[in-house]
Amino acid sequence: MNSFLPAYFTESVTRQYGADAAERIFEGMAGRRKASLRVNRLKAEPADVEKALTENGIAYERMSWWEDAFLLPNTMESELWKLPIYEQGGIYLQSLSSMLPPLALEPKAGADILDMAAAPGGKTAQMASLTGNKANITACEINKIRAEKLQYNLQKQGATRVSVMVRDARKLEDFFRFDQILLDAPCSGSGTMLESDPRTTKAFSEKLVRNSAATQLQLLKKALTLLKSGGTVVYSTCSILEMENENVVKAALKGVKAEIVPIGIPDLPPLPTSLPGALCVCPTDSYEGFFMAKIQKK
Ligand code: SAM
């Protein structure tokens, strides 16, 4: 059943979670994953989205954990591209799991926020939507082409208080200070693998996991430097491997005065984590595997 998955992944998952949970993870990666969208409050309300979907005969489910999240059980993403509400930026196609880190961060109006690894910008725009464009967001992205896509998405969604920086976030000057930081780190993508989409398994390798973990640690250490005292950072990856998640957070926090703040988003399919307060989402037909931890600097 899991023959499409790389052996290093299945072995690592079985070692980390045990045979029963590993089986659940592999089942969640078999077949397809349902499409989902986020309401962009800068341009639309949930009622507008319900109306547009109903008029076009598109079935949807609402999520108990957030009124702006819609799951589309029977619809392909490409069917949404032609809807005027999509063309006008009133909705953004975003996986359910990737909506969680900005919710965990709870971006505040008036705050100086850094999105350290921002393209293509789903979470940057979500933070602009959550704050009604009232936070000062700096969106950093190392890759120039991806930064252009980020800029395009922000403009389309009407996210007006975002400055895009094309930079390696590890090299940001240490004198910057932010109230809130989102580090949605580059990762192996191990939580996104799907039988129906060979692109999701192609790049995965042990080397990628190890290289990602090294970069993630450098980025998280930088985030903790750039954070004001009392400020919070949310560290997230779309990987479910401890080498990129719990181990990175534990290593970054060594010698730093900071604590983990529990993330209390309900009704998600959980995976066990060795970091109390962190949240690890099990891959299912609706959710990608995802990890996040919220850290407050003292
Ligand atoms: N947060 C994005 C979203 O929600 O649309 C997805 C971010 S993706 C997981 C990670 C991004 O980090 C990629 O666009 C990658 O090019 C960028 N990246 C990788 N290393 C980086 C670095 N050192 N500094 C800044 N960005 C980096």
Image: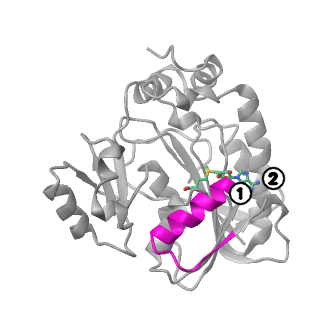
Q: Nearer the viewer, mark 1 or mark 2?
A: 1
Question: Could you tell me which residue is drawn at 37 percent across and 26 percent down?
Answer: 31
In screen coordinates, is 97 left or right of 177?
A: left
- Inspect the image, locate mark 2, and give the three-letter code of the amino acid beneath it: Gln
Quadrant of the rendered structure where residue 48 is? bottom left
Residue 3, position as x, y percentages in the image: 51, 13
Residue 159 within the segment the image draws in magenta: yes
Residues at circles 1 and 2 in contact by the CB criterion of under 8 Å: no
State which quadrant residue 135 falls in.
Answer: bottom right
Q: Position of residue 44 (x, y in %)?
A: 31, 72
Question: Is residue 229 visible from the viewing direction of this image?
Answer: yes
- Mark 1: few/some/many CA within 10 Å (<14, 14-19, 20+): few
State which quarter of the image contains the N terminus: top left
Q: Indicate which disc residue 186 carries.
A: none
Q: Is residue 52 left or right of residue 90?
A: left
Q: Residues within 10 Å of mark 2 (few under 14, many from 20)?
A: some
| Residue segment shown in magenta | 144-164
Residue 101 position, x and y percent, is 52, 58
Q: Quadrant of the C terminus?
A: bottom right
Q: What number of labels is visible? A: 2
Q: Which residue is mark 2?
A: 218
Return the x and y of residue 41 as percentages of the image width and height. Answer: 37, 73
Image check: 168 left or right of 48? Answer: right
Q: Nearer the viewer, residue 210 or 145?
A: 145
Residue type at tag 1: Lys
* Residue that mark 1 sits on: 144
Q: Is residue 253 visible?
A: no
Asked if the beta carbon under badge 2 is closer than 8 A to the nearest atom of ligand 1, the reply is: yes
- Whether the magenta-drawn stretch holds residue 259 is answered as no
- Could you say whether the residue bearing mark 1 is in a helix, strand or loop? helix
Q: Predominant secondary structure in magenta?
A: helix
Mark 1 and mark 2: Cα distance apart in space: 21 Å
